[in-house]
Image: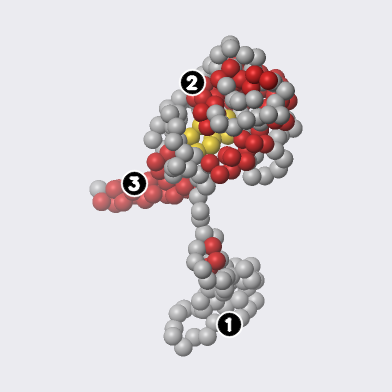
Amino acid sequence: LQIGMLQAISGFYAYVTVLHGFGIMPRMLLGLDSYGIFDYDPGRTSDSRDAYWLYCWNEDITNDYGDCQYYPNFGNLFDGNAAVVDYNQTQWQAWIENEDDFVKDSKNYLVDRFAAVSFDDSSNTNCTTLEPCCLGLNDECTPLQYDTWSSSYWSIIREQWKDDVHRSKLVNNRRCFVEGDYASTYTDDPDGNPMNCNRTGYNDKPRTYSYYPNVTPQQ
């Protein structure tokens, strides 16, 4: 019984640790997939299209729609160009017309988060502020076209989301070669070689001596 309990605790610890490494904190796991987006449903492709990215927000971002939202592949926040070449008007229109709850929540989050932002370059004069109708939530105006979204909206939203999304601040493993122990990432000290580090002949993997007070690290 005790072994089983320890194994269960270890498995749970490993589970939340790996997820945290990908930016998903334990608080975000409760109700994370309450929409059942990835339930087995043969032939259904809209979820893979409209839930391509999962964005989870910092704790100081408060909203009525949960810690995380799913979005289509508008583009990677941190790599590559602001927009992706394989996303187009057909996929955008399908997202605009999608009435699944997770899509409505993601759109409402966008509207609420950027309510105070002016998109003055927009060719859709009804959407210089992001209104619900701009994303197809109601019929009070003509929804945005993808070209307008990618040219006048996405770059602004992308820059804000870079600050909004939660990213785990993990420290790299301490290595024995040139870059040292990354001390500057978590202290005021400059980077240096880990204590008692033997780098001679081992440029590609960590090597350390057993610690004794009289041992001098080889450089």
15 or 60, which is in the foreground?
Answer: 60
The tag on residue 101 is 2
Position of residue 10 relative to residue 64, above or below, is below
For this orientation, the residue located farthest to the bottom is 214
Disc 3, disc 1: CB below 8 Å? no
Pinpoint residue 101: horizontal percent, then vertical percent: 48, 20
Disc 2, disc 3: CB below 8 Å? no
Label 2: which secondary element: helix
Tell me where residue 67 sits by quadrant: top left
Tell me where residue 123 sits by quadrant: top right
Label 1: which secondary element: loop
Position of residue 210 relative to residue 149, above or below, is below
Label 3: which secondary element: helix
Residue at numbered disc 1: 218
Tell me where residue 32 sits by quadrant: top left
Residue at numbered disc 3: 8
The amino acid on which the numbered mark 2 sits, given as a three-letter code, is Asp
| Separation (CA) of disc 2 from disc 3 | 34 Å
* Residue 9 in sight: yes
Position of residue 91 relative to residue 3, above or below, is above
Coloration mode: secondary structure
The amino acid on which the numbered mark 1 sits, given as a three-letter code, is Gln
Instruction: Point out the frontmost of discs 2 and 1.
Output: 2
